[in-house]
Image (tube, rainbow, N blue to C red):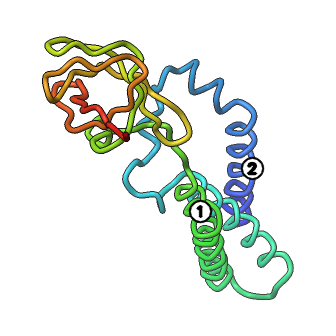
Amino acid sequence: METLFMSCLVGGILYALVSVIFGDWLGQALDGALDFLSLDGHSWLSPTALVGGITVFGGAGLMLQRYTSFGVLPVLIMALLIALIAGTAVFFLYIKPMEQSENSIAFSMHGLSGMMADVLTPIPAAGYGEVMVKVGAGFTNQIAASFDGVDIAGGSKVVVVEVKDSTLYVSEINLS
């Protein structure tokens, strides 16, 4: 049993060291050849939680075997329980909060409907121009056409009425 516990402990430590030190480099060098290992879809099956649990299983098993007088089966069961608790703790205290804190600068074109924009390139009545829309903490420039079929001068404030075929159809806002 000591060999099993030591293998789990050393394997987990080596995995952690290799992934921290060489993880990005290996990912680029292998060009995504190991992407099938990511287990997408079930975040509780993340490698961090699984390998963390396996490492704790090895360490707990070694300690229980050396420092208690329990037999092989109780040590194995207790090491599994400790590993399950540690893997669950890693998931709920580290992985889950990190998933929820991810920020993205991505946006949906259809999500731009109703947003205000500034006209950068004048929009002719029957043609296209360019507008700048504030999205999140940044700005995006998009192709725009007049929703009402009228000319819209550069520097005007507009509102996005609809989005069709990656074009924003805008109407000028008259605040006077």
Q: Tell me the crowding category of disc 2: few under 14, some 14 to 19, or many 20 or more residues within 10 angstroms, Cα based.
A: some
Tell me the distance, in whole angstroms, between the alpha carbons under discs 1 and 2: 23 Å
Towards the viewer: 174 or 43: 174
Q: Pinpoint residue 7: horizontal percent, then vertical percent.
A: 69, 54
Give coordinates of residue 113: x percent, y percent.
27, 41
Q: Residue 142's x, y, as percent? A: 35, 22
Q: Quadrant of the N terminus?
A: bottom right
Residue at (16, 29) in percent of width and height? 147
Residue placed at 46% from the left, 41% from the top? 37
Q: Which image quarter: residue 58?
A: bottom right
Q: Which mark is residue 97?
A: 1
Task: Please report the residue visible at 75 percent of the width from the left and 34 percent of the height from the top.
Answer: 21
Please identify the quadrant where the C terminus is shown.
top left
User: Residue farthest to the front?
Assistant: 176
Image position of 73 (left or right of 163): right
Q: Earlier in the sequence, mark 1 or mark 2?
A: 2
Residue 168, percent from left and from top: 25, 28
What residue is disc 2 on? 13
The amino acid marked with disc number 2 is Ile
Tell me if residue 55 comes above or below residue 37 in the rendering.
Answer: below
Please tell me whether mark 1 sits on a helix, a strand or a loop: helix
| Callout 1 crowding tier (Cα within 10 Å): few <14, some 14–19, many ≥20 | few
Report the mark closest to the observer, 1 or 2. Answer: 1
Q: Nearer the viewer, residue 139 or 148?
A: 148
**Does 76 sit above or below residue 52?**
below
Of residues 173 and 137, the one drawn nearer to the viewer in this rendering: 173
Which residue is rendered at x = 65% and y = 82% of the image? Answer: 78
